[in-house]
Image (spheres, grey):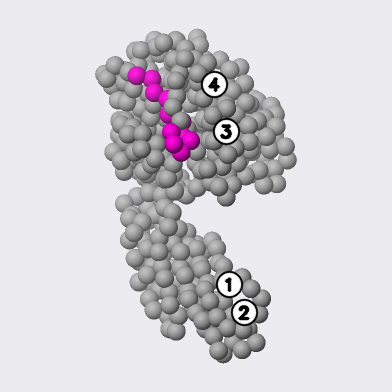
Amino acid sequence: MESSRAKELIDKHLTYEEAKQLLVKLVQFPSPQTTLLEEEPQVLALIQQTIRPELEKDGIRPIIDDKGNLIATLKGEDQGKSLLLVSYAMNAAPATMENPYSGEIVDGTPYQIEGECVWGRGACEQKGSLAAMMLAIKIIARCQAKLPADLIFATSTAGETGRHLSVNHILNHNKIKTDWGILDGPPQIQLGNKGRIDILVTVKGKPTHSSRPWDGINAVQGAVKVLEKLDPLMPYPSKRAHPKLGQVSLTPTLIQSFPKATHTVPAECQILLDRRLLPGDDPNEAVEDLKTAIGEIDPYEVEIRGEDFSYPSEVTRDAEIVSALEQSIRTMLGREPEYTFASAALDAGLLNREGIQSVSYGPRDFRFQHTDNELVSITDVFETAKVFAHIALNRR
């Protein structure tokens, strides 16, 4: 569809009021991250009880896979690039936020935002983008508009889990083939992001009664020696830097000893380290580097292994997906696009690694995610939906 015709259709059928109502509905449905992660019943319920019925109102027939992820496909004419929109059903836990699922409409002025905002946990991360993607596919289906190629909308059961488990399942279990991908992000085109890997260091000693510590080998003391070896590498284990993302980092995020018993010299002590990655870094190499740095520590046994990870990501300004998104922003919003990078780890790394040219874009304002004042601009959600609909209709 020609760009001007696509704009005319979107402006006619997509309304601010519909964006507001859908966003409020999503925020009012709790879907927090818990220890159950992707298997949290409230997250699965949001997909089954709200997202699927909303799509079905416009004749869309999504499937829900064996892990609870939702996939909806609008078939196209194979005359352009196929597009995958990736949304997320899980949001951060409410923590100390008051009335976290009120979905209240508030004035954005105190937060340096023009116009109305929706308040609540998940409004900023990730339900603003979720609403915008849903609106885009809904109006395209409602109008029975012809698509140049397949449009696939997916809602992952994940959120900030630090791993690709859910989106990897969406792609490979469901055998999704697509050229381009857009994931939840900020109002700037996010060209890249850091990756990460959790590295678990387990120090093993010899337990004994704490009244006779000389009879044992205290694993906590061994963990201290590990941290002493790593101290020169924290927070920057390498001088290599990216012009936009800066350096990699190494940060201990958890220390725990076993057994958890009084009057006992610990037999084991675990240190969990968060190692950030730059584009081009291999998670396995980061683990091997740490093994070399720690080496042997007598009389302790030290085990080091990589756990959950996310690949780093980067696309260039001249990538096809970037050019198409630039055109949609100019056409629908009448302004020049801006660009950014993120230090967070995202699923864009997996998509790009799978050969799916991908960026992040959306209404997320990083100032408000995970805070007691989480909110999102309704105008930003409305405008993002316009951009998503336009790129879906006008791909070449």
Residue under the point 45% across and 80% down: 300
Q: Nearer the viewer, mark 2 or mark 4?
A: 2
Of labels 1 and 2, earlier in sequence is 1
Question: Does residue 327 appear to the left or right of 161 in the view shown?
Answer: left
Under mark 4, the amino acid is Glu
On residue 259, the disc is 1
Report the Cα–Cα distance between label 3 and label 4. Answer: 13 Å
Per the image, the residue denoted by label 2 is 264
Percent x, y of residue 252: 51, 64
Label 1 crowd (10 A; few <14 / some 14-19 / many >=20): few
The stretch drawn in magenta includes residue 30: no
Residue 367 is at least partly visible in this image = no
Report the Cα–Cα distance between label 1 and label 2. Answer: 8 Å
Of labels 3 and 1, earlier in sequence is 3
Specify start and end residues of the magenta stretch as a single range: 65-75
Looking at this view, name the residue that lies furthest to the front.
66
Q: Nearer the viewer, mark 3 or mark 4?
A: 3
